[in-house]
Image (spheres, helix red, strand yellow):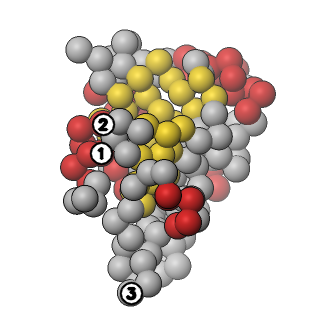
Amino acid sequence: MTETFFISDHHFFHKRILELTSEHGLLLRPEFESVDEMNQLMVENHNSIVGHKDTVWFLGDVTWKQNTEAKALLKSLNGKLKLCPGNHDDIKWLCEFFDEVVLWKRFPEHDFILSHVPLAREDLKRSRTNVHGHLHEKNVLDHTGKPDERFINVCVEQTGYLPLSLDELKLLFQPA
């Protein structure tokens, strides 16, 4: 049986991401000593749960570099890769590695829509939930300052550097 997975904001080969801090002054990715260690863990995590026939939706900001090393890394990832590009992605360069590249993707059968940047609330008329990336450790907040349950952030910092399966994702949906 094939599965569908979702993940965002790997930032492969982005050395500076290891120096970035949250609004509270904490490192975004404190578990890594080097970009090579970060890349290796994310590839191992990916390939440990994604099979060759599975589909993986990357919701942007895939890789910082465009070189032979990045090509080899992307080619080593299991599954049929699909992309909603992010603000750091060179779409023309990445097309070689992804079976489908779209700005957003609607899944009407599950009532959600994929995007890199969270959609505006008024754009959730056609889908109940927005699965997105871009915010790293942050979440979209509602008017009370609590996480808005209509938005699911699948950035690697939120998922333990593992792609989320469709079944795992559906568990996070706000009850109708």
Residue at the image point whose x is 71% and y is 36% from the top: 65
Marks 2 and 3, the one that precedes in the sequence: 3
- On the image, numbered disc 3 is attached to which residue? 144
For the residue marked with disc 2, what is the amino acid? Leu
Looking at this view, is 44 or 162 the one in front? Answer: 162
The residues tagged by marks 3 and 1 sit, at their Cα atoms, a distance apart of 24 Å
Residue 111 point in image, percent of width and height? 37, 45
Quadrant occupied by the C terminus: bottom left
For the residues labelled 2 and 1, say whether their Cβ atoms are less than 8 Å apart: yes
Task: For label 1, count other residues whose C-alpha is less than 10 Å away and answer few (under 14), some (14-19) or many (20+).
Answer: some
SS of the residue at dot 3? loop
Is residue 75 visible from the viewing direction of this image?
A: yes
Q: Position of residue 86 (x, y in %)?
A: 65, 46
Which amino acid does the dot numbered 1 rest on? Answer: Leu
Q: Residue at left 58%, top 33%? A: 83
- The alpha-carbon separation of the residues under discs 2 and 1 comes to 5 Å
User: In the rendering, which numbered label is found on residue 166?
Assistant: 2
The residue at which mark 1 appears reads as: 169
Residue 117, position in %: x, y? 59, 56
Q: Mark 1 falls on what kind of element?
A: helix
Taking the image as shown, residue 135 lies to the left or right of residue 53, namely right
Q: Are marks 2 and 3 in contact (CB under 8 Å)?
A: no
* SS assignment at label 2: helix
